[in-house]
Amino acid sequence: MEAGIAPEQISGVGISSVVPHLTDIFETLSNKYLHADPVTVSADLPLGITIHYKDPTAVGADRLCNAIAGFARYGGPLIIVDFGTATTYDVISESGDYLGGVIALGLESAAAELHRRAAKLPRIELHFPSTVIGRETVSSMQAGLMFGCVDALEGTVARIRRELGTNARVIATGGLAPVMARHTAVISAIEPSLVLDGVRLIWERVRSA
């Protein structure tokens, strides 16, 4: 409704969810109100890639969407960094296979935990301070979180590239991707809608199979 699209204009529904009880609700809503049998993203679908996780079904739907959309746009090898609740790194081979990745605490989650677990540490906005050495609590926390994230990003990417034996391209997505990209040369492109692009591509692939 907010987008100005009437329900009868919707011809298909794709769902990318990592919250099982909400997945069931969205599937029910899709069938009941949109009269569309949704494609719910999972490793069980014919994605056209090989997933090298020991348990492919353990890979989150959002990470599969990122992998499909990232490879479709850039090819491989590719490292996709998603700055969300968790900061995830998804590694895609030259042929488009999902090789695995890295999961770390996200910036917003880390900031919330600092505030929750340390009584005197306030809630802060996630901005880069002007200096690494903070002169008061807020800028000190911002320096630790923001510059620490940059260093973790660059270090993790360097380790992945060494393990791959190639200088894989790095693209970023998620709400804080533009902020982080301004402070590192490692990120070569920002793709804000990567998960949504992946949902669409997977829906098209499944429906044409």
Image (cartoon, rainbow, N blue to C red):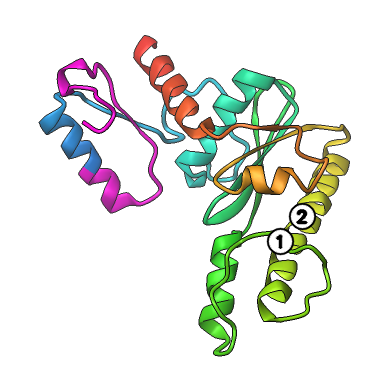
- In the image, residue 179 above or below residue 197: below
Tell me: 147 left or right of 205.
right
Q: Is residue 1 at all visible to an observer of this figure?
A: yes
Closest to the observer, 146 or 172 = 146
Task: Determine whether the residue tagged by mark 1 lies in a helix, strand or loop.
Answer: helix
Tell me: 12 left or right of 178.
left
Mark 2 Cα-neighbour bin, 10 Å: few <14, some 14–19, many ≥20: some
Per the image, the residue denoted by label 1 is 146
Is mark 2 in CB contact (under 8 Å) with mark 1?
yes
The part of the chain drawn in magenta is: 1-25
At label 2, the amino acid type is: Val
At label 1, the amino acid type is: Met
User: Image quadrant of residue 138?
Assistant: bottom right
Q: Position of residue 91 (x, y in %)?
A: 69, 37
- Tally the marks: 2
Closest to the observer, 153 or 163 = 153
- The residue sitting at 71% across, 61% down in the picture is 146
Residue found at the very far left of the displayed protein: 32
- The residue sitting at 42% across, 32% down in the picture is 44
User: Image quadrant of residue 187?
Assistant: top right
Task: Determine whether the residue tagged by mark 2 lies in a helix, strand or loop.
Answer: helix
Per the image, the residue denoted by label 2 is 150
- In the image, residue 132 above or below residue 42: below
